């Protein structure tokens, strides 16, 4: 009876080694891109610039500013609406920027397969 034991260390296929190396490189680049996303910002305005909201690439609101003319206790609801509008625009812009950053890294490592994202 023939028995096969794979306990012995065998050399890895060069193609597999190359693929693993690329995977490790891609992982390192993705980690770097994730760190950079915290420094990328997008600022959106509402009410003709009366309300400004800035979000980072991690899609976190980092600042909100108001022109003094918009701060009226009698117009609280309008101010709330402007903040929501500006925040949503800033988050959408930050999401787009972060997707561009991640896609740029992924394109370096992914093959061009029609219909698949990240193809070059």
Image (cartoon, rainbow, N blue to C red):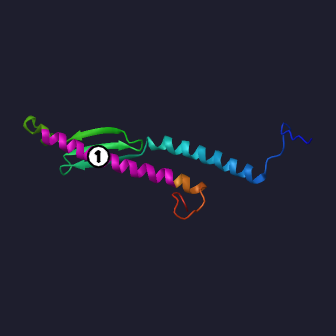
Magenta stretch, overall SS: helix
Residue at the limit of the structure toward the right, as seen here? 1
Question: Who is closer to the viewer here, 48 or 101?
Answer: 101
Considering the numbered disc 1 on the image, is that residue within a helix, a strand or a loop?
Answer: helix
Residue at the limit of the structure toward the bottom, as seen here? 114
Residue 83 covered by magenta stretch: yes
Left or right of 92, for residue 37: right
Left or right of 74, for residue 67: right
Count the labels in the image: 1
Left or right of 72, for residue 13: right
Is residue 71 among what the camera can see?
A: no
Residue 47: where, in percent of width, then height? 18, 49
Residue at horizontal 19 percent and vertical 44 percent from the top: 82
Mark 1 — residue? Answer: 88
Question: Who is closer to the viewer here, 48 or 19?
Answer: 19
Residue 89 covered by magenta stretch: yes
Residue 15: where, in percent of width, then height? 74, 54
Residue 30: where, in percent of width, then height? 55, 45
Question: Who is closer to the viewer here, 70 or 90?
Answer: 90
Residue at horizontal 51 percent and vertical 45 percent from the top: 33
Is residue 37 among what the camera can see?
A: yes
Residue at the limit of the structure toward the top, as seen here? 73
- Tell me the quadrant of the picture where the N terminus can be found: top right
Residue at horizontal 10 percent and vertical 37 percent from the top: 72
Residue 80: where, in percent of width, then height? 18, 39
* Circle 1 residues within 10 Å: few <14, some 14–19, many ≥20: some
The part of the chain drawn in magenta is 77-103
């Amino acid at each position: 009876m023939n028995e096969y034991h794979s306990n012995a260390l065998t050399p890895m296929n060069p193609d597999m080694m190359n693929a693993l190396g690329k995977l490790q490189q891609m992982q390192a680049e993705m980690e770097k891109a994730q760190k950079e996303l915290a420094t990328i910002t997008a600022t959106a305005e509402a009410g003709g610039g009366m309300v400004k909201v800035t979000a980072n690439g991690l899609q976190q609101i980092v600042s909100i500013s108001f022109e003094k003319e918009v701060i009226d206790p009698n117009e609280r609801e309008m101010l709330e609406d402007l903040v929501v509008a500006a925040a949503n625009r800033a988050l959408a812009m930050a999401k787009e920027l972060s997707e561009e950053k991640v896609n740029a890294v992924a394109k370096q490592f992914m093959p061009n397969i029609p219909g698949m994202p990240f193809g070059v």
